[in-house]
Image: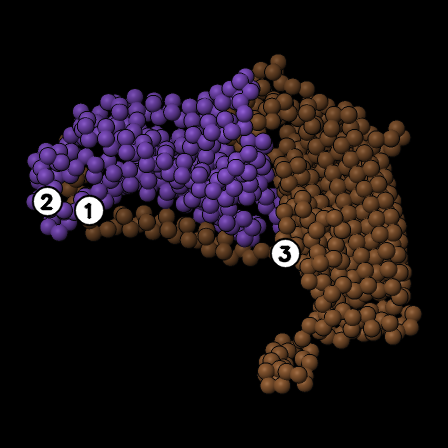
Amino acid sequence: MLKSRTLILLISIGVIGLATPFSIASDQPQSVDVIAELIDQADDGATVTVPEGIYQGNLIVSKPITLLANGQVIIDALGSGTVIELRTEGITLRGFTVRGSGSTVDHEPAGVRAFDGPVIIEDNRFEDVYFGIDLRQSPETIIRNNFIIGKELELGRRGDGIRLWWSHGCVIQDNTAIDLRDMVFWYSEDLIIERNKVSQSRYGLHFMYSHNTVMSENELTDNSVGIYLMYSNNITLKHNRVVNNRGSSGYGIGLKDCDDIIIQDNALLANRVGVYIDNSPSSVDAVGLITRNRLSFNEIGLLATPITHDNVITENAFIENEEQVTVHGGGQLTLNSFEKDGRGNFWSDYAGFDLENDGIGDLPHAPRSLFRNLLAREPNLRIFVHSPAQQAIELTARAFPDLSPQPMFTDPHPLSSVPALQLMSSSDSTNPWPMAALSGGLLLASLSVGWFIIYTPGRSQTQRLHHLRSVDA
Amino acid sequence: MTTISNDQYCGLDHRSNFSPGHTSKGYCTLLFARREFLDALSSRWFLLYTIAFSMLSISVSYMSLAGSGSQGFAGFGRTTAGLLNLIMLVVPLMALIAGAGSIAGERERGTLLYLLAQPITRTELLFGKYIGLAVAMCCSMGFGFGLSASVLAWKAGGVGLGSFSMLILLTCMLSLAMLSVGMLLSVLSRRSGVATGLGLFCWLVLVFLSDLGLMAGTVIFKLRVQEVFAIAIFNPLQAFKMGVIVNMNASLDVLGPVGTYATRTFGDALSWLLALTIVAWIILPLLFAMLVFRKRGGV
């Protein structure tokens, strides 16, 4: 395929060189007017197949038609304005490569901007775009299986990968966004958001005033924040994998003034903060449920503001977080429940025991840490974490109970083993052989250095020195 | 190397007693290094150290992966911090004690004068001893790390290969730095008991007292982030810890505002800065020890 295209290219270059005025090669860029003309000629609801090639300029579609790319169709706005505008409902855009939008903030140029819905945007590739896909009041739109990679700009200057504005009932599935700002949902309700992957962006999934949505099986890696819900109620997060989101104020999942949130069966690994709760729930009769998640290797497993209340945190596995649970600025989480129906959470630092063997630890889990309390008061001290001096302080606090602070929370029924969790597993597996080689190499090197030194031919001289020494002794 | 003047040697020139062709300065140094290595191998502290370090690092690696195996994921968690803590406690202790015993012990036994009566310079002797102990310590740690790498390969595959290799490298550098300090103490003290005591005190200062003091200072004087960083980095143990974390996380954000400040200010140069600090701790005490030893000699 590639070969034949190269061949065509070479031939066409030759042909152009010989007889420029007489031939138009297929790889020669054309104007998007060619596509606009094809659309003009088609009836409403018809399918327009765009032939392979590069089309330059900004395309506006204001007729309900299906646009299909036949092979690789590249639409390039050459760095100015929005590449494709969908001005009416009922448009389908499938299989295009969209690139080269403008990059100025004032007009927010995008790869595709839709002004009405429903439309379908499927199987497209977006490169070098400021915003990726921007829906403005385009309800019930389907955005599926698009690949979006943004411009090389610093984090705060980038545009959003996918943005919804007043677009209810949309389906966002199987999209991948890299190097963008957010995948953000404004005032949009009843969405389905599944199997998207966002990495190296600012916020993976960002909700603003958007209610009633289920988000599942999304993968959010290496962003500043994985999922941030703000002022959005009744949202369920299930089976998401949130890994290594560690902006300097980054969270795996952040909740800001959100009511009735369910966070269930998610893997939250190696984030700066696993789950951050800022005044959620905020209404009187609302609750929050955090259950059956794995929170591992985060700097802080669960971070909450002091006024946080009415959350139920149960059957989660808190494993090896540097700080398992802490309160922003100090305080206690007594208004939240760390158990439900007699089942608490698994804590990798639980020091109790389970004599009855019923899976529930016999002693409540109420960790006290003087150093943590110092940290909450004086953040600069964090430079001393992971050092023996930190252990010394903890030891002192244990030796002199007067110094020991109040526990930040109490889990009355901690689980004695990791609960069976249904998590989305990692897609990539690693090759153990380099590590095995390192192991073998180290062992071999250390032993052979020893062997070599012991049995080198310089022995007689050393014996001589030994002899001299022993004579003296 | 044949034109070395007599006054550089400690005592008479017996060089002709050694087999010809093997009389270069480097050769003598290596000879002493070898002797020191063999002494270390035959001593109990070395065996004990190797066994303890291996057992501890294996168990820490095993424990750190027990909870993460199902996710195929190894991150910087409490147990990795545990390994770091272990290294920061054990490695400086062993290196300081081994270094402190080296010259002072010979001096106390009277063998130092005898060694110096051999046709070698004081620099060669000190350097030889240093190299011998350094190789012994690195071999012992290499063995321990090799065993824990096999645990990692078995339980977690190749996860974290780069940062683990970096941990090994930095640990070796830390042990060299602490050995340097130990040698300096050893050169300064007349009796091996004093040297060991000084080594222990130095360990206490580096591991606990300086950090605790700086903590108190941070709280009482409300030190700014750049001040805390500037003071903290002087401690080779802190430099080591930061170096390990930078290599694992690509930033020091883990260490709060101070770490963020360091990452923002120095960027990619940060790991070099930290490595340079440790290298300075290797070179400077050894250089100082050399100067003192050349002046003082066997007495």
- Give the SS element for disc 3: loop
| Tag 3–tag 2 contact (CB < 8 Å) | no
Residue hosting label 2: B3
Judged by depth in the image, the label closer to the viewer, 3 or 2, is 2
Q: Which chain is brown?
A: A
Res. A225 image quadrant: top right
| Tag 1–tag 2 contact (CB < 8 Å) | no
Q: Nearer the viewer, residue A351 or A182?
A: A182
Q: Can I make out residue A340 in this image? A: no
- Seen in the picture, residue B156 relative to A36 is either above or below; the reply is above
Given the image, what chain letter belongs to the residue carrying mark 1?
Answer: B
**Mark 1 is on which residue type?**
Tyr
Residue hosting label 1: B27
- Give the SS element for disc 1: helix
Q: Residue furthest right?
A: A44
Q: Can I make out residue B190 in this image? A: yes
